[in-house]
Image (cartoon, rainbow, N blue to C red):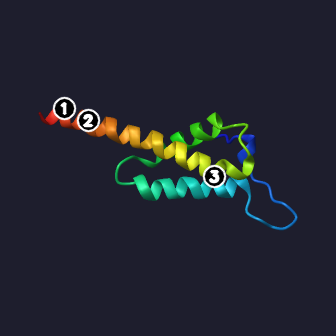
Amino acid sequence: MTTDSRLADSSDDEGTATPAVHYADVVEQLFLEYEVLLPLHTITAVAHQCARDLAGSPTAAMPELIGRLARSRLNGLVADTEGRAARRIS
């Protein structure tokens, strides 16, 4: 999987966490929240698409923005899945 250049692994002289590390943290947190509802590949794909859609946003804000947008989209996927399951039952 290719990553957005804004998420590419790099470090500064002070040894602070890299954007790629922040992105991985976001995906990990999303997985912890949605693992019983959606497969990892879906969660990762949604997070990656969110990162691409948010290109041009301030780098420091990317983890928060990706997390918020991904949660919104993942919640929509969960609702769609639950809706289809309910229609099959009735």
Other residues around mark 3 within 10 Å, as few (<14) / some (14–19) / many (≥20): many
- Residue at horizontal 75%, vertical 53%? 9
Q: Indicate left or right for 30 with 88 as reference.
A: right
Q: Residue most toward the right?
A: 13
Disc 1/disc 2 C-alpha distance (Å)? 6 Å
Q: Residue most toward the bottom?
A: 14
* Helix, strand or loop status at disc 3: helix
Q: Tell me the amino acid under the disc marked 2.
A: Gly
Q: Are marks 3 and 1 in contact (CB under 8 Å)?
A: no
**Circle 1 is placed at which residue position?**
87
In this picture, is 14 found above or below 52?
below
State the quadrant of the C terminus.
top left
Q: Are marks 1 and 2 in contact (CB under 8 Å)?
A: yes
Residue 59 screen position, x and y as percent: 74, 48
Q: Are marks 3 and 2 in contact (CB under 8 Å)?
A: no
Q: Tell me the amino acid under the disc marked 3.
A: Pro
Earlier in the chain: of badge 3 and badge 1, it is 3
* Helix, strand or loop status at disc 1: helix
**Circle 2 is placed at which residue position?**
83
- Residue at horizontal 47%, vertical 46%? 71
